Image (cartoon, helix red, strand yellow):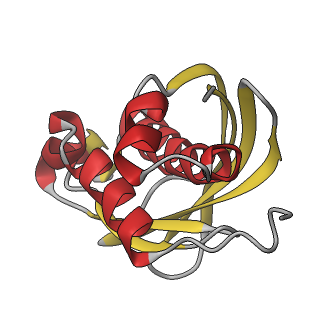
């Protein structure tokens, strides 16, 4: 079965959602899980005062941007690793993949994070036996591309 034939079942989607929703930092930031598929992960972040980095201009903090792109990238890496573990139950898959971690993350900040709502998307560039590489983007509510990221994740 190739990656394109792999189906992200509702059970697996719930497992991924539960995994990321249980991370306290994700809740503090207010990250909301949107779309999940084998092709793409989408997450949303409503702006709130606690996330402002430049108080004069009211723009999103760079650390929040980096964190959001890391979280969406990690979710995509996790989904990309599922294919190798199809023979396992969902619980066994999640136990094996619970060691998911970021090896490297590069963020290019392209424009100030202005807006009331932000959307992060991630796509898998490569998923190997131990490592996955993911490309992510952050857009403001008006469609402005705010930042792009490339993350390398330990996932095996």
Relative horizontal placement of residue 110, taking residue 50 as reference (left or right): right
Is 20 or 129 nearer to us in this picture?
129
Between residue 104 and residue 118, name the one nearer to us: 104
Query: Percent x, y for residue 46?
Result: 25, 67
The quarter of the rendered structure image containing the C terminus is top right
Q: Which residue is drawn at 33% across and 72% down?
A: 117
Q: Specify whether 144 is left or right of 49.
A: right
**96 relative position to 91: left or right:** right
Tell me where residue 134 sits by quadrant.
Answer: top right
Residue with the most extreme top position:
103
* x, y percent for residue 118: 41, 67
Answer whether residue 16 is visible to the viewer in this image: yes
Q: Looking at the rendering, which quadrant does residue 150 occupy?
A: top right
Spot occupied by residue 147 in the image (x, y as percentages of width and height): 62, 50
Up-down relation of residue 97 to residue 89 (above or below): above
- Where in the figure is residue 80, as x and y percent of width and height? 67, 51
Q: In which quarter of the image is the N terminus?
A: bottom right
The answer to whether residue 115 is seen in the rendering is no
**Which residue does the image show at 38% across and 32% down from the upper left?**
95
To which quarter of the image does residue 133 belong?
top right
Total marks placed: 0
Residue, x 45% and y 56% (percent of image)? 113
Residue shown at the point (25%, 54%) measured from the top left: 18
Looking at the image, which is closer to me, 83 or 153? 83
Would you say 33 lies left or right of 110 here? left
| Residue placed most toward the observer, 123 or 47 | 123
């Amino acid at each position: 079965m190739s990656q394109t034939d792999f189906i992200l079942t509702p059970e697996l989607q719930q497992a991924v959602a539960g995994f990321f929703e249980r991370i306290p930092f994700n809740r503090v930031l207010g990250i909301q899980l949107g779309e999940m598929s084998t092709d793409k992960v989408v997450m949303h972040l409503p702006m709130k005062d606690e996330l402002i980095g430049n108080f004069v201009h009211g723009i999103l903090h760079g650390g929040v941007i980096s964190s959001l792109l890391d979280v969406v990238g990690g979710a995509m890496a996790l989904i990309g690793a599922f294919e190798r573990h199809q023979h396992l139950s969902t619980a066994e898959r999640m136990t094996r993949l619970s060691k998911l971690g970021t090896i490297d993350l590069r963020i290019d900040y392209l424009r100030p994070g202005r807006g009331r709502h932000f959307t992060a998307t991630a796509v898998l560039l490569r998923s190997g036996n131990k490592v996955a590489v993911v490309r992510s983007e952050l857009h403001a509510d008006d469609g402005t591309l705010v930042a792009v990221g490339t993350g390398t994740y330990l996932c095996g």
